[in-house]
Amino acid sequence: MTDENQNALSRRRLLAGIGVSTAGAVTLGAGHGIAEAAPEAGVSVPADRFGRMFPNLPAFAPATNQVRAAMSDIGKRGGILDARDPLERGPIDLIIDPALSVNNRDNPFHTAGTTFLGQFLDHDMTFDTTSPLGVPTAPETSVNARTPALDLDSVYGGGPISQPSLYNPADRAKFRIEFGGLFEDLPRAADRTAIIAEPRNDENLIISGLHAAFLLFHNRVVDLLRSQGVPESELFTRARRTVTWHYQWIIVNEFLRQLCGYGIITDVLAHGRRFYKPEPGPAFIPVEFQGAVYRVGHTMIRPSYRANLAGDLGKAFFGFIFDPTQEGSPDPGDLRGRARAPRRFIGWQTFFDFGDGQMRPNKRMDRRISTPLFQLPLSAIPSGDNPTSLPQRNLLRHITWSLPSGQDIARAMGIPTLDASQLPELAGYGLGLDRSTPLWYYTLAESELIGDGIVLGPMSARLVAEVFVGLLQRDPNSYLAVQPSWRPTLPSSRPGEFAMVDLLRFARVDPASRGQ
């Protein structure tokens, strides 16, 4: 019997044990000719709730114990998604030895920071604290604790009046920032809990460093506007808009083009949205995006990273993204958050390209998930509950939201679907998952098989692009809504443009400013 047949048989036995039987690119300069969506009515959902893009499509599978067991099996450590990284070789070898990554390929067109910028964006627009994993729940009954907009409410919170603990008591126009290590750190309480508007932005060292960089970026913008004579009464509001518009520019002109490809973003901006249609109501976060497609970022995570070049007693600090053996340490050897020590800061030349040859790539968007993500520390899970396997949590969320299959959404978009023969590893479950595939899994497979893991596949790219552009167009304060021809005004390597390396330079957390 072949390994494939043995795997299929073992999956059928697993499910049988539950006791349930199974009967176009166009040319357009950035910032010009932006097209709003056609003014036809869409799906009306309150802004503080989740909703659906495709409310008439059925769930990919019934919410049975057999389906739950299949989702758990697909997402388990050692299962079909596990890249089986040889963790015993240590975090350094997994970066420098290409032979150890043949089953978990690098993406030569993404920097390692793309992952964490994507996580930062996710935390800026969606936070579900109530829906139970694997239990069908109507999205409209679940509160989104973030505003459905890319407005940095995850950084600014309620502002200096409503949330003064986030702001510098000596200068209310600026954020609090602390320097507990060699360089900046988030402000922290005595138990090391970060004092920030979005608690998930201290989940790992990289995103906590990114949040701190945005605090410093804002503070530097305040300094600039003060030097230009902006009245104190207008200073905070002007600084927030400047910061937010430059951030939104990066999303549209850097991040989305990396993730989705230039053509699809240009097409959505020029010709409008076809499927994300909240009009005439407010913007909302669709569960097809929140619960599945945008979680493609999890497959981009490396098993280990070089956090900085010289922070560990003059040597580079390498660590696994998460390592369960480091639980309880005040200065863990992995890159989890909620810790402070001199070496715990980010050297951004690893994560974004400053032209010095130090940048490292992401992993590809494919059906291979880095092994450390199959055993998260509970501190990295907002609800603090099991399972600790991130892929299992993603797949069980499909049952929570009764998400459609990837094939059904592709057909609704008029996009050719993957054939069942391209998903043979799912056939063994005996549930038809190779023909009606969980949306997140389909996103991974489509990106791998059509985009070579470098960019999203056509269905997922269209969905992601429309949601991001739609959120910006429906936000009355965004640059796409207020002044779509606007271009960045802050100093940058290319006048009229602005990228993450420019933001980090302006915040003075770049390698040149730090001297390392």
Image (cartoon, rainbow, N blue to C red):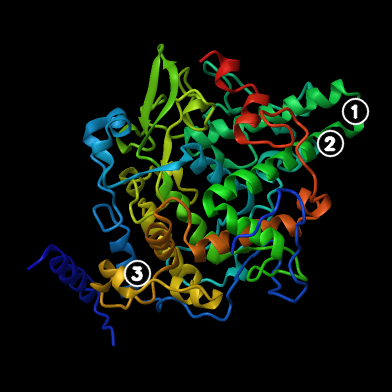
**Which is nearer the eye, 121 or 76?**
121
Indicate which disc residue 230 carries.
1
The residue to which callout 2 is attached is 238
Instruction: Count neighbours of disc 2 (C-alpha within 10 A) and say few if under 14, some if 14 to 19, many if 20 or more.
Output: some
- Mark 1 to mark 2 CA distance (whole Å): 8 Å
> Can I make out residue 212 in this image?
yes
Q: Nearer the viewer, mark 1 or mark 3?
A: 1
- The x, y position of residue 119, in whole percent, is 53, 45
- The x, y position of residue 356, in whole percent, is 49, 23
Q: In this view, does 377 lie above or below 20?
A: above
**Is residue 295 shown left or right of residue 370?**
right
- The type of residue carrying mark 3 is Arg
Asked whether disc 3 touches disc 2, contact meaning CB atoms under 8 Å apart, the reply is: no
Q: Single out the residue that lies furthest toward the left.
A: 1
Residue at 55% over, 20% down: 511
Q: Of helix, strand and loop, which one carries label 3?
A: helix
> Can I make out residue 144 in this image?
no
Residue at 64% over, 61% down: 267
Precedes in sequence: disc 1 or disc 3: 3
Instruction: Count neighbours of disc 1 (C-alpha within 10 A) and say few if under 14, some if 14 to 19, many if 20 or more.
Output: some
The residue to which callout 3 is attached is 68
Precedes in sequence: disc 3 or disc 2: 3
**Which is nearer the eye, 449 or 192?**
449
Could you say which quadrant of the image residue 471 lies in?
A: bottom right
Q: Of helix, strand and loop, which one carries label 1?
A: loop
- The x, y position of residue 325, in whole percent, is 29, 34
